[in-house]
Amino acid sequence: MSDASTPANGNGPKSAYFLSHSDEGIERRTLAVLVDNEPGVLARVVGLFSGRGYNIDSLTVAEVDASQHRSRITIVTQGTPHILEQIEAQLLRIVPVAEVIDITNSKSGIERELALVKVAGVGEKRVEALRIAEIFRAHVIDTTNESFIFEVTGASEKLTQFVDLMRPLGLVEVSRTGVLSIKRGKEKG
């Protein structure tokens, strides 16, 4: 005797309700969400994620078109392809959301992040910190006799690598913007 979730021959589910997506791999996605710039929009977008148990790895928001009162929310999240499709569809159902652009799956997508990194050190550690900063094209934006603050931009992985190299040299503090994204070419998005 079979239950409702399996056919009489016992070979797998007979209904879409019993299909599992657990065999799908976890993917990282960067979504650019264009929204009307009005009170509560960010709370609704973030609420969608928290209400369904989705995590946000990075979140940046800024007005990008004052004349149309449009803001761009850039969200980095992770999940199975099925969950990520659900996230995109659910974002589009929020009334002030005008467009959702998957930057990760776009060949023309560019992602960057900015970090301010404070490093304290003297002597050889100070010299080594400057040498590494030069390799990473980090700029010294503040200095004292015992510390530096570096500004470094690039892919998130590059920033993480820079921070990891500064750790043994006297890393004090890190402040990161979160991922920003845009598409190459003349089209908007």
Image (spheres, rainbow, N blue to C red):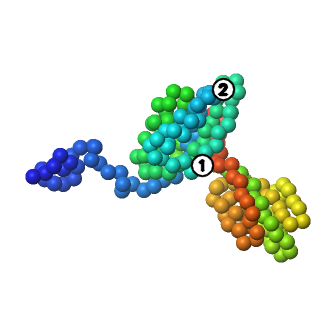
Q: Residue placed at 64% from the left, 55% from the top?
A: 156
Rendered position, 131 above or below 74: below
Query: Can you see residue 78?
Result: yes
Name the N-terminal-most of marks 1 and 2.
Answer: 1
- The C terminus lies in which quarter of the figure? top right
- Which residue is pictured at 40% across the width and 46% down the height? 82
The Cα atoms of the two marked residues, 1 and 2, are separated by 23 Å
Query: For this view, does 147 lie left or right of residue 23?
Result: right
Question: Quadrant of residue 17 in the image?
Answer: top left
Please name the residue that numbered disc 2 is placed on. 69
Amino acid type, label 2: His
Residue 152 showing in the rendered view = no
Whether residue 66 sits left or right of residue 78 in the image: it is right
Residue positioned most to the bottom = 124
Residue 185: x %, y % from top left: 65, 39
Tell me if mark 1 has few (under 14), some (14-19) or many (20+) residues whose alpha carbon lies within 10 angstroms of its own: some
Residue 36 vs 118, above or below: the answer is: above
Residue beneath label 1, please? Answer: 58
**Residue furthest left as drawn:** 1
**Position of 39 compared to 6: left or right?**
right
In x, y percent, where is residue 31? 55, 42
Q: Nearer the viewer, residue 132 or 145?
A: 145
Above or below — where is 97 with respect to 1? above
Disc 2 element: loop
Residue at the far right: name it.
Answer: 145
- Counting from the top left corner in percent of width and height, residue 122 is at 85, 72
What's the amino acid at mark 1? Ser
**Residue reaching furthest top?**
67
Q: Callout 2: 10 Å neighbours few (<14), some, many (20+)?
A: few
| Disc 1, SS | strand
Q: Is residue 35 left or right of residue 86?
A: right
| Residue 100 in the image, given as x and y percentages of width and height | 54, 36
